[in-house]
């Protein structure tokens, strides 16, 4: 994507303003795909300077770049502006993205009427399911993690939870056996690894709750987004 962006920039240098703007937009898109949001924004700024008529493609990409950078207020500003477009597919796209952005901001109540305007049963059902359920509490996941594996299980990561339980049990068994045999060197080594696994169970319970919550949010946002215009 970076190499493509460079080629588009080279092409823009040898074209009149209108065509150069198109190449700079393409360079911005390539930078966005590469994850270089600052470079993408710079190319869009130059494209807008050269563009005298149709600013719609620039606004769409600015909105997507802001969304990728988690600049939710800026993204909302552009999506709200895009809803004034004469093109129905652009208005629908902007409405989906705005609803998804509101959800990312933790404003599900504001997302609901936007989703209702979509008249999309899948998006409506996804939002209803999301609001009907509750996030996992990271602090509770960590607390349950004091029982090896329970923190993972709390967030639905059952296989990881059982692995954590079995491994901790094996290490504790090894500690008991080496202590009975007075093999203190082996006891110290096994104890060190057990402390590592045990603390991992606690922190893992916290991380599992965060992962669960983020995945739940992402699934709902994906259902609201539907097909995207730019991609």
Image (spheres, helix red, strand yellow):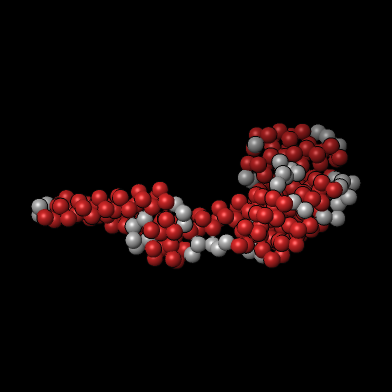
In the image, is 120 to the left or to the right of 104?
right
Q: Quadrant of residue 25?
A: top right
Can you say which quadrant of the picture contains the C terminus? top right
* Residue 108 shows in this picture: yes
Seen from the viewer's position, the closer of residues 5 and 96 is 96
Which residue occupies 65% across, 59% down?
A: 128
Which residue occupies 85% across, 48% down?
A: 88
Which residue occupies 21% across, 53% down?
A: 173
Give the tally of numbered discs.
0
Residue 208 x %, y % = 46, 56
Residue 171 x %, y % = 24, 52
Can you say which quadrant of the picture contains the N terminus? top right
* Residue 59 shows in this picture: no
Which residue occupies 67% across, 65% down?
A: 107
Seen from the viewer's position, the closer of residues 37 and 212 is 212
Residue 78 x %, y % = 77, 56
Seen from the viewer's position, the closer of residues 158 and 104 is 158
In the image, is 85 to the left or to the right of 220?
right
Residue 99 x %, y % = 72, 57
Seen from the viewer's position, the closer of residues 166 and 187 is 166
């Amino acid at each position: 994507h970076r190499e493509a962006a460079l080629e588009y920039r080279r092409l823009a240098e040898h074209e009149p303003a209108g065509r150069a703007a198109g190449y700079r937009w393409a360079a911005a898109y390539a930078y966005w795909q590469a994850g270089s949001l600052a470079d993408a924004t710079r190319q869009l700024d130059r494209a807008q300077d050269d563009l005298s008529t149709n600013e719609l493609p620039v606004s769409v990409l600015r909105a997507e770049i802001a969304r990728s950078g988690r600049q939710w207020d800026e993204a909302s500003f552009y999506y709200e502006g895009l809803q004034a477009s004469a093109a129905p597919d652009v208005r629908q796209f902007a409405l989906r993205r705005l609803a998804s952005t509101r959800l990312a901001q933790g404003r599900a109540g504001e997302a609901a009427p936007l989703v209702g305007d979509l008249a999309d049963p899948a998006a409506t059902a996804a939002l209803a399911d999301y609001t009907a359920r509750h996030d996992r509490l990271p602090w509770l996941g960590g607390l349950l993690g004091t029982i090896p594996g329970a923190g993972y299980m709390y967030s639905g990561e059952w296989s990881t939870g059982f692995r954590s339980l079995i491994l901790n049990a094996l290490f504790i068994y090894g500690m008991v056996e080496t202590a009975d045999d007075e093999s203190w060197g082996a006891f110290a080594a096994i104890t060190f690894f057990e402390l590592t696994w045990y603390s991992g169970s606690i922190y893992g319970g916290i991380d599992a709750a965060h992962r669960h919550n983020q995945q739940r949010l992402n699934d709902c946002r994906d259902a609201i987004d539907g097909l995207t215009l730019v991609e």
